[in-house]
Amino acid sequence: MSLRIGIVGLGVISRYYLAALDAVPDVRLGAVCDTDPDRLAAHPGVPAYRDHRALLAAGDVDAVVVTVPNDLHAPICRDVLTAGMPVCVEKPLATTLDEGLAVDRLAADRGVPLFTAFHRRYNTSVRELVRAAPDPVAVTVRYHERIEEHVGADRWYLDPARTGGGCVADNGPNAYDLARLLLGELTVTGARIGVDAAGVDRTALVDLRADSGATCRVDLDWSYPHGERKDIEVRLADGTVRRADMLAGHDGFKASLWHEYRAIVRGFAAVATGRVDHRTDGGLAALSLVTDTYRLGLPTATPVRVGAERPGRVAR
């Protein structure tokens, strides 16, 4: 029997989940939920709701994907977990560490899976790098884009109250998760954050240290002028440098996300059905690093940049 998954939030990211639900065996779309009736109308034949609580009460789904503005992640996850359903939530887990801790605690108390959608860890180039680069001594994660090209109609990304800040709150968790895959637990040792007039952080340079003594730099940019650049560079103890380009082999704007979200749905289905034991997936750890970045960061109105940049892939 197929796992019936409900999607709460039909914004820019939902398309990848919808495509994955069509492609991955033993899962199917059970219901959709959004406050916009036009978005709901695009899914005829599927139970549709304006309120996630009505979806939870209707019995149409076995598990839920939450892909709504960041400030709604925690409250909707709480309702899903309280209803006893596994939940997959887009990063960040919450916009504050206290909210994230409360959601994580609720999942543990209820014994219900809480799965954070760190899609970049499933990227083919990333997985190859993790296998090929054991015990790195230094890691650089670059996550560059022009955010206005990525958000479509979801303009809430540019509201710091809704996104949690800006590039640190929204792209930071993906970058930190990748660093943790390679280095294990990390501590923020310093940060510089470039903010715009609206208070949105557009650039950030974050230095971290692993328990092993290895170092990491996370380089975030929401004002990248050259299209898109998302890569990881790793230096090993013998001086060897290895690199993963997350966009390589995936032609077209955001094309890498299609295979990453198929893996997200497969992973979530395995967890939701109990085929994979799951307690924590790093959502809280990444949120803690975001919190420490803002606490230690020195905000400046000048964009923070490192040297000359190579052009990335042009957004189109």
Image: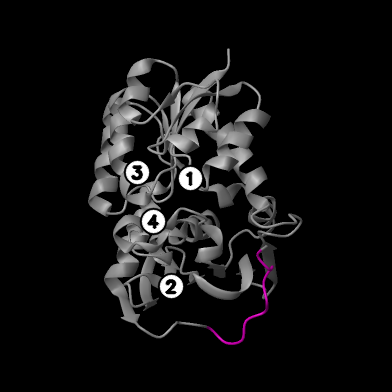
Q: In the image, is residue 215 above or below residue 108?
A: below
- Residue type for callout 4: Trp
Q: Amino acid at mark 2?
A: Arg
From the viewer's side, name the closer residue of 183 and 225. 225
| Residue drawn at point x = 33 percent, y = 23 percent | 54
Q: Earlier in the sequence, mark 2 or mark 4?
A: 4
**Residue at the spot x=27%, y=54% of the render?**
96
| Residue 294 badge | none
Q: CA distance from mark 4 to mark 3?
A: 13 Å
Tell me which colouring the rendered structure shows.
one colour
Q: Find residue 163 and report its horizontal and vertical position in percent.
A: 36, 57
Say the numbered circle drawn on residue 202. Answer: 2
Q: CA distance from mark 4 to mark 1?
A: 11 Å
State the separation of the CA atoms marked 1 and 3: 14 Å
Q: Which residue is mark 4?
A: 156
Image disc number at residue 73: 3
8 vs 269, left or right, is left
Spatial CA distance of label 1 from label 2 is 22 Å
Residue 108 in picture, x, y percent from top left? 30, 32
Picture layout, residue 54 above or below residue 228:
above
The residue at 34%/61% (across/down) is 159
| Mark 4 vs 3: CB contact within 8 A | no
Q: Secondary structure at mark 2?
A: strand
Pointers 1 and 2 in contact (CB under 8 A)?
no
Give me the disc on residue 11.
1
Mark 3 lies on a secondary structure that is: helix
Going from N to C along the chain, the mark reached first, 1 or 2, is 1
Residue closer to the observer: 14 or 46: 46
Question: If you read the primary sequence from the N terminus, does the residue marked by circle 4 or circle 3 appear first?
Answer: 3
State the extent of the magenta-drawn residues as a range.
Answer: 306-315
Mark 1: amino acid:
Gly
Q: Earlier in the sequence, mark 4 or mark 1?
A: 1
